[in-house]
Each structure stands twice: as C-alpha cells, then as structure tokens.
Image (cartoon, rainbow, N blue to C red):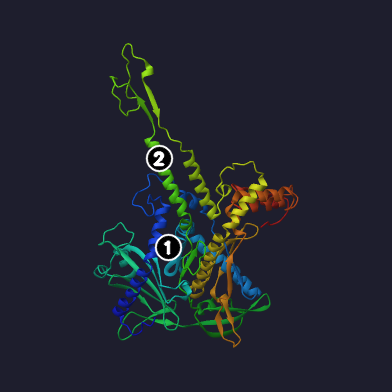
Amino acid sequence: MNLTTHNKQQRLAYIRSLYEQAKQAGAAQDALFERHMKQYRGSDEIDGSAERAGTVRNITYEIVESQVSSSIPQPKVDPVCYTERRDRAAKAIERLCSSVRDRLPFEEMNDRDERYTYVYGSSVWFLEWDHTISTYGEAGGVRVSCLSPRDFIPQPGITHIEHMDYCFLRFSTTRAELCRTYGASEEQAALASVEADADTALDDNEAATVIVCFYRDADGEVGQFIFSGELILADIEHYYRRKLPTVDGENDHALADQTYETVFRAILLEDRLPCEHFFTKSELCEAAEGTVLHVEELHVPYYTPSGFPIVIRKNTSGDDMLYGQSDCEFIRPEQQAINKIESRILQKLLRAGVTPIVPEDATVALNNAVFGQVIKMKPGESAAQYGTVDTTPDISQDIAEAERLYQHAKRTLGISDAYQGLAAASNESGYARQLQISQAGGRLDSKRTMKQAAYAAIDRLIFEYYLAYADEERRIGYRDGNGCVQNTSFHRYDFLERDKSGAYHFSDAYLFSIDQNGGIEGRREELWEKNLKNLTSGALGDPTDHATLLRYWQSQERAHYPFARENVEYFRDALKARGGGEVT
C-alpha cells in the first residue's frame, strides 16, 4: 500500500476503511467460528429448527479433548550449506529457541492453541520484539501471543499470509493500558472505542479495542499502524528497521531509520592459530592485549526481517483455505443427530410410568406423587378390581443408534477407543491393539505435522528477531549428553558471512524443523522403562560397574526421574573415591 501521500488522519481513514471491508468480507467465516465454539461448549441448537434439544450429549467436547496434547515440539535447525562454523551456529539457534520457550508461558499458550486449532480449525501466533524487556544486562526480548483466529482479520480473497498486502489483529484492553503502553494522555484515550462484538466485561468508558494493521509498502517492506476509534497509537512506516531518535523541522520526536552498523573484524591469536572474530567497539577494547593480530572496520547492513510477524497453525489443510478445517464441522451431523435422539430418549422416559386402573366407584383419589398415597379397600372389595398399565418405553434401539453415531464421529476423525484409553470390548492380542493405536496415530499424523510446521515458523521468527535486534551476547544454559548443565551463548555476529563480492552480511540461510526425538520427553514413564532396559541389557556397559550406573542415572535425570539427581551425585562421588578422577 502506498500511504506516503496521506497525512495521519487520511491514513487512519484509509486503513480503517480497509479494516471494515475486511471484517465485512470475513463475516461469514466469523459466524462459522462462533458456531463451532458453541458446538464445542454443548449448544442445544438444532439446525433448521427453532426447537431446542432437551438434552445434549457433548461428543464434540469429548472428541476434541481426547486429542489435546501438552507436548511442545523441540526445535531443530540445520544450515542450508554445511560448514563446521554454520553447524555450531545452528546448534546455538536451537538452544536460543529452547531458552526463549522456557522463559515464556508456552505450556499455557500450547493448551489454548490446541483447543483453538481443533475447534476453529486454526490458531494465530503473533511475535514481536519488545525493547522494554531487560534481564541480566540484556536489552530486549521476544514476546509471543497465541490468539483466536476470530481476532485475525485477513485481506479478503488471499489464502496465504505471505501473499497479503495487509492484515489486522484485534485486541481488547483498557484505556488506562493505552496510556501506559503507548503514552497516550487521558484526553487522547477518550477517543478510543470498543467494537460491538469485542469480548469484554468492562463498560465502554473503561474498555478499548486496539486494531493493529500490518501492511506492505511499495517496496515490499512491512509497516505497522495501530489505532482505536479515532485515536492513532502508532504509525511506523518501516516496522523492522532500527530507529534512532532525531529532530526535524516538523517533529521533535521523529525516528530515523538506521541502515548500517559499524563492526570491527579482528584476527586473534588463539592456541597459536589465527581466528576471525567480530566485535563492537566496546567489545574490541575488552579483547585480551597481545592477541590481536589485525583489526578492520566494516560497515555492515543491519539484518531486516521481511514477512509479517504472524504464524497460522492449521488443523488440517483444505483447498485454497487460509484457515484449516475444523473438527467441529466434520462431526456436526452426528452431534446434531445424537442431540435429537437423546432428547427423544428423555421425552420417552419423562412420559413413561405405571398408570393405575381403579373401579369407577373407587373412593380413593390418585395423584402423580411417588409413594404419596395409600389405597384402603372397603370390606368386600377385592384387589382384583384394581390394576395397572405399564407405559415404560423400549429405548434400547435409541441408545444403540446414538452409540452408532458416536462411533461414526470418532471414525471420521480417525480416533479409536484405544487412542482414547478406553477398554477394548474384544479379546484382541496386545500386538493387535498396539497396531490399532499406531494406525489411528497415523491418521492423525497430518495434524501433528501442521503443529510442527507452525512451531518451526515460530522458531524462525524468534531467530530473525534476535539476529536483527539482540546487540549483546545472549548467555544460554543447556544440558549436555551427560545431563550436566553447560553454558553457551548466541551472538548475532556469529552469523556474519562474506559474499562473492567480498561484502559482509548477516546470513539467515538455515532450515527450521522439529526434533522428531524430542516428543518422547513428554512420555516420561516410557523413557524411564527404556533407560532401565538399556541398563539391564548391558547396552550402557557392565550393569554392576559404577561408571555404567552413573550413565544410567544421568539418563534418568534427563528424563526427570524422581530423586535421580541424588543418585548421580552418589555414583559420581563413588567413582572419585575409587580414583576415577574428575567425572563430568
């Protein structure tokens, strides 16, 4: 979009018109999202009828919840073209992404993400660099948010986010938060507004709906425009470029784009070998005296990300669909039919009962109370004069049909009783049941693949942010192969490379995927059993040797076995006492 010819109010009017058009174009999709969520929560609506279901057996909730996984995929990074230096850099990226995940509430976000994905068909992840984060002398860090797809408004007609010219994110907040976050005054905050469909319990005088617009300019660079009602909160033409405060004739608080930085290339003598390193001016001064063989001043362009800071996770892909396919949509016919059948069963049972038959001249009054009356017979009357009509219905066919529909819904999504952990009705062998679970898992594999693709995209964005903005060396802790905590670092200067023309640039030529072996860490009991089997089978060495037992308990410590740390310390001290020297 070309906004250079607009002043701020014209930009606001133009972008707001695009937002309203995009909202209107996505109204049908938003209504579908709302219907899916109502179905998940147990709605009693019956399609095509004003009548409500008398009772709801919520198979949608049961099936969705059976798929929710607390497993968070572990990052895996490989260089596009292998060198030893790039391989070390790839490992640093992996540890950086793991460290960022550990610092953020990814467990809570994953829990929300799982349900958004299966119910709506998609979830939306938003990543941003926050300069206000400061920890242990490190300035800046990544913030990650998992959003409902109802709060993402895409450009109409475009089914891939990388092809969009603009898109919008919607947040509900308070006007006081606008003052704290964006520096707005109370008078300016009064210009903010609340959308009619915004999910907030506050009144209009306290709440505000913030709209964040990301767009591409004529050169393809990403810009950001944030507003709420008539209030402009931010207007950044080059969103990813570094900004330096400056003063111009019209604005005392203008920000100028920074394009290049000064980097010092130094050749240091390490272990009698010359090694190439890159430093800032202050870091160069801290280098050891007498080890610097050569220093060269370079002007290197800052790294600038190019895509929107948004990742969409799909449930399963559809034909020309921005969002994934919802599980609720596929099992809605069965859910609706079960609701009707269960309502019919309830109506039958409520109308059922035992109706008494009495003579015409009986002197007893009857009512519907259970055990609320006593029939006293007159002298000469016979009990044979009294009788009953049993109207208890046969609901066995209704129950069988409801259960049949439930099995249809599960088979539609590839979910078996074994997958849900339910007892098997047949006398099958353990191998047969294991094969069933494996086959069911295979049918659900596409969903796991989509989750892994989304996390790989999240990891790439994390890396790009640190490559662009993390000026200080970032210290990272990790566990090595022996289970011991080690320290390493991530420094964006480690990604400086020289092209064929001799110019230096920051290289982002790395492939992001998911460590397929990382998922087993979520199945700790299985891992404990495998470690014990390795010990008893001799795979780790002599099971009676202290060194072997130390390796075993180090493996158990990595798998979070209770009190494994104490055993590691015991066998480490035992080896030292036997003259084994220092044991890592």
Residue 508, image x and y in percent? Answer: 55, 76
The tag on residue 147 is 1
| Outermost residue toward the top in this view | 379
Q: Secondary structure at mark 1?
A: strand
- In this rendering, does residue 313 appear at all? yes
Residue appearing at x 54%, y 58% in the figure? 72
Residue at which label 2 appears: 346
Location of residue 51 in the rendering, given as x and y in whole percent from the top left corner: 34, 49
Where does residue 219 sit, x and y in percent of width and height?
44, 83
Q: Nearer the viewer, residue 235 or 331?
A: 331
Q: Can you tell which quarter of the image residue 229 is in? A: bottom left
Mark 1 crowdedness (10 Å alpha carbons): few <14, some 14-19, many ≥20: many
Comparing 537 with 48, the one in front is: 48
Compare residues 545 and 112 and report the one nearer the observer.
Answer: 112
**Disc 2, SS:** helix
Taking 406 as reference, is 255 left or right? left
In the displayed structure image, the side of residue 89 where residue 219 appears, left or right: left
**Residue under the image location 36 percent in, 25 percent down:** 356
Where residue 16 sits, quadrant-wise, is: bottom left
